[in-house]
Image (tube, grey):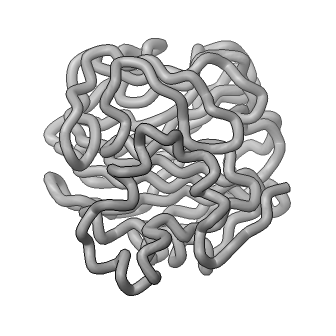
Amino acid sequence: MLKTVSNGQSIHQYIPPHLRRMFYNNPATVHASQNGKDPYGFPTNGLALYLPLWALKDSAFKSIDPYHHACTVTGATYGSQGRTFGGNAKITIPDNATLRLGTGSLLISIWVKPDISQSCYLLGAYSGVANGGWALWLSTDGRIYFSYRLSGISRDQSTLAAAVTTNTWQMLTWLLNKSTNEIVFYNGTTLKRTQALVEAGDLSENTTVEMGYLTYTAAYGKATIGEIIRVNGLGTVAEITQIYNATKWRY
């Protein structure tokens, strides 16, 4: 397991040389407050995926984490704060055991500026087979959703009321706690709902991970995604707070 460090030096080792100027020469004041070393001091113990889409400009790139997942861009427009999605624009990662939900716990945080004039698909791996598959998305009434499929039935679980604001940057976090079979929803550091899973089971699915567009249902949405962080293992409120404080200066 990677060592969790407060100054984020373990993230540094995954940043390719051609991106280091972009990462470390930004004049944001947070750099000075952290001695000029680390604007990325979030937990890296169990880090499975880090996609700072504000830094990754090319049509194909690798994630900045221990696994260097190969990512392919289709139509998602680059901007200084992230990638803008709409229609069938998407980013894909080939199936990888590290990114299957399975029966383990995890934390996924996404900085997003959504347009919820229509349902907004963000991230998932879902092909509609009888067992497995999952998706994270937002509804037109502002609710945060976690959808999954088990025993041939698709499940949708969400916050009870609107939890996001349209056209505003916010960090949304999903905690999947398989030891208690719960899904927990946060906006920033604010708890929005804790809910027992309707059905417990192995959510692994051997399929492509997709961002911005879900091929199985042709679901998409208008949104800009700034970055995605996934940590395998039981996430905590302290980790959410650390991720939020280490990344919010960009938004």
| Depth check, front residue: 62 or 123 | 62
Residue 65 sits above or below residue 124 on the image: below
- The quarter of the picture where residue 149 lies is top right
116 displayed left or right of 48? left
Residue depicted at 61% across the width and 28% down the height: 69
21 displayed left or right of 78? right
Residue 32 sits above or below residue 20 on the image: below
- The quarter of the picture where residue 77 lies is top left
| Depth check, front residue: 145 or 111 | 111
Residue 211 screen position, x and y as percent = 42, 30
Residue depicted at 59% across the width and 28% down the height: 154
Residue 70 sits above or below residue 241 on the image: above
Residue depicted at 43% across the width and 49% down the height: 20
- The quarter of the picture where residue 231 lies is bottom right
State whether residue 192 appears in this view.
no
State whether residue 116 appears in this view.
yes
Residue 151 screen position, x and y as percent = 75, 25
Residue 125 screen position, x and y as percent = 58, 26
38 displayed left or right of 227? right
